[in-house]
Protein backbone atom coordinates (compact mmCIF):
# COMPACT_ATOMS: atom_id res chain seq x y z
CA UNK A 1 0.00 0.00 0.00
CA UNK A 2 3.04 2.24 0.41
CA UNK A 3 3.57 2.46 -3.36
CA UNK A 4 -0.10 3.28 -3.93
CA UNK A 5 0.06 6.01 -1.28
CA UNK A 6 3.17 7.57 -2.83
CA UNK A 7 1.63 7.68 -6.30
CA UNK A 8 -1.70 8.95 -4.97
CA UNK A 9 -0.03 11.73 -2.98
CA UNK A 10 2.29 12.72 -5.80
CA UNK A 11 -0.47 12.66 -8.44
CA UNK A 12 -2.60 14.94 -6.28
CA UNK A 13 0.27 17.38 -5.85
CA UNK A 14 1.09 17.15 -9.57
CA UNK A 15 4.61 15.99 -8.82
CA UNK A 16 5.25 12.28 -9.17
CA UNK A 17 8.80 11.38 -8.38
CA UNK A 18 9.85 8.49 -10.59
CA UNK A 19 12.93 8.04 -8.45
CA UNK A 20 10.76 7.54 -5.37
CA UNK A 21 8.59 5.01 -7.23
CA UNK A 22 11.71 3.17 -8.40
CA UNK A 23 13.12 3.07 -4.84
CA UNK A 24 9.84 1.63 -3.57
CA UNK A 25 9.79 -0.96 -6.35
CA UNK A 26 13.40 -1.92 -5.65
CA UNK A 27 12.49 -2.45 -2.00
CA UNK A 28 9.79 -4.85 -3.18
CA UNK A 29 6.74 -2.70 -2.49
CA UNK A 30 3.54 -4.48 -3.53
CA UNK A 31 3.03 -3.37 -7.12
CA UNK A 32 -0.66 -4.37 -7.32
CA UNK A 33 -1.97 -3.35 -3.91
CA UNK A 34 -5.60 -2.29 -4.17
CA UNK A 35 -7.29 0.63 -2.39
CA UNK A 36 -10.87 0.63 -1.09
CA UNK A 37 -12.43 1.45 -4.47
CA UNK A 38 -10.20 -0.97 -6.36
CA UNK A 39 -7.67 1.56 -7.62
CA UNK A 40 -4.10 0.35 -7.99
CA UNK A 41 -0.87 2.29 -8.29
CA UNK A 42 -0.93 1.69 -12.05
CA UNK A 43 -4.51 2.99 -12.27
CA UNK A 44 -3.50 6.22 -10.50
CA UNK A 45 -0.38 6.67 -12.61
CA UNK A 46 -2.47 6.25 -15.78
CA UNK A 47 -5.14 8.63 -14.54
CA UNK A 48 -2.47 11.24 -13.75
CA UNK A 49 -0.76 10.70 -17.10
CA UNK A 50 2.51 9.73 -15.42
CA UNK A 51 4.03 7.83 -18.30
CA UNK A 52 7.32 7.30 -16.46
CA UNK A 53 5.62 5.90 -13.35
CA UNK A 54 3.27 3.73 -15.43
CA UNK A 55 6.22 2.32 -17.40
CA UNK A 56 8.13 1.56 -14.18
CA UNK A 57 5.09 -0.19 -12.71
CA UNK A 58 4.51 -2.24 -15.88
CA UNK A 59 8.20 -3.18 -15.97
CA UNK A 60 7.78 -4.36 -12.37
CA UNK A 61 4.88 -6.59 -13.42
CA UNK A 62 1.84 -4.45 -12.61
CA UNK A 63 -1.41 -6.07 -13.73
CA UNK A 64 -3.23 -4.04 -16.40
CA UNK A 65 -6.39 -6.13 -16.11
CA UNK A 66 -7.42 -5.28 -12.53
CA UNK A 67 -10.67 -3.33 -12.32
CA UNK A 68 -12.02 -0.80 -9.85
CA UNK A 69 -15.28 -1.40 -7.98
CA UNK A 70 -17.14 0.33 -10.82
CA UNK A 71 -15.46 -1.88 -13.44
CA UNK A 72 -12.96 0.64 -14.81
CA UNK A 73 -9.57 -0.53 -16.03
CA UNK A 74 -6.30 1.31 -16.44
CA UNK A 75 -7.40 1.94 -20.06
CA UNK A 76 -10.48 3.78 -18.76
CA UNK A 77 -8.24 5.82 -16.44
CA UNK A 78 -5.85 6.87 -19.22
CA UNK A 79 -8.72 7.72 -21.60
CA UNK A 80 -10.82 9.60 -19.05
CA UNK A 81 -7.91 11.94 -18.46
CA UNK A 82 -6.99 12.17 -22.16
CA UNK A 83 -3.49 10.73 -21.74
CA UNK A 84 -2.90 9.21 -25.15
CA UNK A 85 0.78 8.36 -24.57
CA UNK A 86 -0.14 6.45 -21.42
CA UNK A 87 -2.92 4.70 -23.36
CA UNK A 88 -0.43 3.65 -26.05
CA UNK A 89 1.91 2.32 -23.37
CA UNK A 90 -0.86 0.22 -21.83
CA UNK A 91 -1.83 -1.19 -25.22
CA UNK A 92 1.67 -1.99 -26.43
CA UNK A 93 3.86 -2.67 -23.39
CA UNK A 94 5.21 -6.20 -23.66
CA UNK A 95 3.81 -8.70 -21.21
CA UNK A 96 7.36 -9.93 -20.58
CA UNK A 97 9.71 -6.96 -20.91
CA UNK A 98 12.59 -9.21 -22.00
CA UNK A 99 10.79 -10.23 -25.21
CA UNK A 100 10.98 -8.00 -28.30
CA UNK A 101 7.66 -6.61 -29.46
CA UNK A 102 6.70 -4.87 -32.72
CA UNK A 103 5.93 -1.22 -31.85
CA UNK A 104 2.23 -1.24 -32.80
CA UNK A 105 1.34 -4.77 -31.75
CA UNK A 106 -1.46 -5.00 -29.22
CA UNK A 107 -0.13 -6.84 -26.17
CA UNK A 108 -3.31 -7.20 -24.16
CA UNK A 109 -6.41 -9.25 -24.75
CA UNK A 110 -9.37 -8.12 -26.83
CA UNK A 111 -11.48 -8.71 -23.71
CA UNK A 112 -9.51 -6.08 -21.81
CA UNK A 113 -9.59 -3.66 -24.75
CA UNK A 114 -13.39 -4.01 -24.80
CA UNK A 115 -13.90 -4.24 -21.01
CA UNK A 116 -17.00 -2.32 -19.98
CA UNK A 117 -17.40 -0.47 -16.69
CA UNK A 118 -20.57 -0.61 -14.58
CA UNK A 119 -22.34 1.71 -17.05
CA UNK A 120 -21.44 -0.59 -19.91
CA UNK A 121 -18.91 1.86 -21.32
CA UNK A 122 -15.67 0.64 -22.83
CA UNK A 123 -12.66 2.95 -23.00
CA UNK A 124 -13.72 3.69 -26.60
CA UNK A 125 -17.22 4.76 -25.46
CA UNK A 126 -15.55 7.09 -22.98
CA UNK A 127 -13.14 8.56 -25.55
CA UNK A 128 -15.97 9.12 -28.05
CA UNK A 129 -18.29 10.78 -25.52
CA UNK A 130 -15.54 13.04 -24.19
CA UNK A 131 -14.46 14.07 -27.69
CA UNK A 132 -10.97 12.62 -27.25
CA UNK A 133 -10.31 11.89 -30.92
CA UNK A 134 -6.68 10.88 -30.54
CA UNK A 135 -7.51 8.36 -27.79
CA UNK A 136 -10.44 7.03 -29.84
CA UNK A 137 -8.26 6.66 -32.93
CA UNK A 138 -5.59 4.78 -30.98
CA UNK A 139 -8.23 2.37 -29.64
CA UNK A 140 -10.06 1.92 -32.95
CA UNK A 141 -6.88 1.25 -34.90
CA UNK A 142 -6.88 -2.22 -33.36
CA UNK A 143 -8.95 -4.80 -35.18
CA UNK A 144 -9.88 -6.27 -31.80
CA UNK A 145 -11.80 -3.08 -30.88
CA UNK A 146 -15.53 -3.83 -30.98
CA UNK A 147 -16.94 -0.56 -32.34
CA UNK A 148 -20.46 -2.01 -32.36
CA UNK A 149 -20.35 -2.82 -28.62
CA UNK A 150 -23.45 -1.48 -26.84
CA UNK A 151 -23.62 0.01 -23.36
CA UNK A 152 -26.37 -0.66 -20.81
CA UNK A 153 -28.63 1.86 -22.60
CA UNK A 154 -28.05 0.05 -25.90
CA UNK A 155 -25.81 2.84 -27.28
CA UNK A 156 -22.89 2.11 -29.56
CA UNK A 157 -19.67 4.10 -29.49
CA UNK A 158 -20.96 6.10 -32.47
CA UNK A 159 -24.22 6.88 -30.62
CA UNK A 160 -22.44 8.57 -27.70
CA UNK A 161 -19.71 10.24 -29.77
CA UNK A 162 -19.24 13.97 -30.21
CA UNK A 163 -19.58 15.21 -33.80
CA UNK A 164 -15.79 15.19 -34.32
CA UNK A 165 -15.55 11.65 -33.04
CA UNK A 166 -18.51 10.56 -35.19
CA UNK A 167 -16.63 11.85 -38.23
CA UNK A 168 -13.54 9.92 -37.14
CA UNK A 169 -15.54 6.71 -36.64
CA UNK A 170 -17.21 7.08 -40.04
CA UNK A 171 -13.85 7.67 -41.74
CA UNK A 172 -12.33 4.67 -39.97
CA UNK A 173 -15.33 2.59 -41.01
CA UNK A 174 -14.87 3.61 -44.65
CA UNK A 175 -11.17 2.74 -44.50
CA UNK A 176 -11.90 -0.67 -42.99
CA UNK A 177 -14.62 -1.52 -45.51
CA UNK A 178 -12.44 -0.54 -48.50
CA UNK A 179 -9.47 -2.66 -47.39
Image: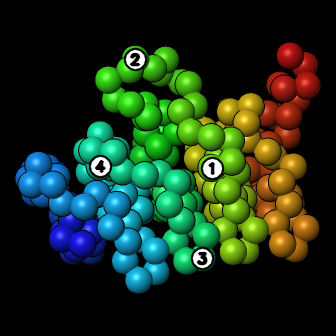
Residue that badge 4 annotates:
57
Residue that badge 1 annotates:
112
Counting residues from the N terminus, which is met first, the one under dot 1 or under dot 4? 4
**Relative side of 92 to 30, left or right:** right
Q: Which element carries disc 3, helix, strand or loop?
A: loop
Residue that badge 2 annotates:
100
- Alpha carbon distance from label 3 to label 2: 34 Å
Asked whether 3 or 17 is in front, the reply is 3
Q: Please identify the quadrant where the C terminus is shown.
A: top right
- Alpha carbon distance from label 3 to label 4: 22 Å
Residue that appears at 32% across and 67% down: 33
Asked whether 163 or 94 is in front, the reply is 94
Among the 4 quarters of the image, the one containing residue 55: top left
Residue that badge 3 annotates:
70
Counting residues from the N terminus, which is met first, the one under dot 4 or under dot 2? 4
Give neighbour class at mark 3: few <14, some 14-19, many 20+ (Cα, 10 Å). few
Q: Is residue 59 above or below residue 16?
A: above
Give neighbour class at mark 2: few <14, some 14-19, many 20+ (Cα, 10 Å). few
Amino acid sequence: MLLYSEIRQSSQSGCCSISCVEVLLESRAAVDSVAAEGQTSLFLACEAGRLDCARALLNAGANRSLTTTDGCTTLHAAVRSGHVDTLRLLLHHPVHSDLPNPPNRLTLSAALLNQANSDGWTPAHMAAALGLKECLEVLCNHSEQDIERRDKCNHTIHDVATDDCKDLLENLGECLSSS
